[in-house]
Amino acid sequence: MIFSEVLGIKCHGCGKKIKFNTFLCESCIKKIKNPEVTYIGFNVYHYGKYTELLKELIIKYKFSGYEGLKKLFGNFLTESILNNTENINDFEITYIPSSEKSIRKKGFIPAKIIAEEISADLNIKLTEIFSSGAKKEQVKITSDKRETNVSGKFVLKNHIPKKLIIIDDVFTTGSSMKEAFRLLNSQCEVVGFTVAKA
C-alpha cells in the first residue's frame, strides 16, 4: 500500500487519491491551467483565472495557513517561466512586497514564498528589490483605489539587475506590478508572472 493511501491523501479539487504533498490530481491541474498574458509596459503571464478551484486554493494559501501550497504554485510558475522566458540564467527573480499590515496579519509574504520555490527550482538568484510602505492591504481595497494605495509607496532596497522576473500571486488591476516597473525606470528587462488573473 502506498503512502498516500495510508494517510488518505485526496485531491483538493475532486477528492481523488493523490501522491503525498501534491494537493491536486493531474485532471484538476488541467482544469485550472488557463494561460493568459497582460501587457502593462511589460508582459505579465498568468497561469490561470482567479475563479473556482484556483481562487479557493489561493485563499487557503494566503489566509488559512495552507503554506504547503507554495510548492504547487511554485511549480505552476516555474512551468510558465520556462515556457515564456529565454536564457533563464541571465535573470534574477524578485516579488511584489506586501503591506506592513498584511505581513503582521499573515506572518509571511505570499509572493516571496512562491518566489523562493521558483528560485530553488530554476537555480536563479532571488533578490529582494522592493519594500512596501502601503498602509492598507490591496485585497481590502476596491479596484479604483488600488493604484492610489501603492503609488509612491514602493521603495528600492537593492541593486537593479539587467534582467528581472517579478512574481505575484494574484493580478487584479496590475497596480502593484506597474508601481514596481515605474521604480525600475527602464533600467532592466522585466517580465512578470502571477498564479492567477482576477
Image (tube, rainbow, N blue to C red):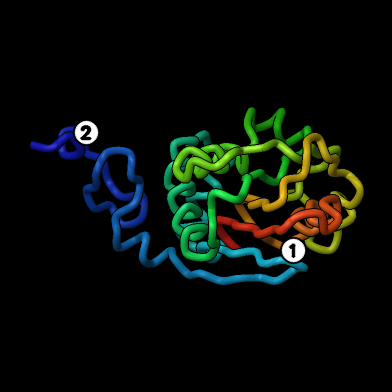
Residue 187 versus residue 160 in the image, above or below? below
Q: Which residue is mark 2?
A: 7
Viewer-nearest of discs 1 and 2: 1
Is 48 displayed left or right of 21 in the figure? right
Q: Which residue is painted at 66% across and 70% down in the image?
A: 38
Q: Amino acid at mark 2?
A: Leu
Q: Secondary structure at mark 2?
A: helix
- The image's mark for residue 173 is 1
Q: Is residue 73 above or below residue 171?
A: above
**Crowding at mark 2 (Cα within 10 Å: few <14, some 14-19, many 20+):** few
Q: Classify 10 Å Cα crowding around label 1: few (below 14), some (14-19), many (20 and above).
A: some
* Image spot of residue 83 (x, y percent): 47, 64
Point out residue 10 in the picture as x, y percentages from the top left corner.
Answer: 27, 46
**Front-lying residue, 92 or 11:** 92
Where, quadrant-wise, is the N terminus in this rendering?
top left
* Residue 67 position within the rendered picture, expressed as x and y whole percent measured from the top left: 49, 35
Q: Amino acid at mark 1?
A: Thr
Residue 139 image label: none
Q: Is residue 167 visible?
A: yes
**Residue sitting nearer the eye, 50 or 132:** 132
* Residue 61 makes an appearance in the image: no
In the image, taking residue 9 as reference, residue 177 lies left or right, namely: right
Residue at 37 percent across and 60 percent down: it is 29
Residue 43 percent across, percent down from the top left? 67, 67
9 or 150, which is in the foreground? Answer: 150
Residue at left 44%, top 65%?
A: 33
Front one among 126 and 90? 90
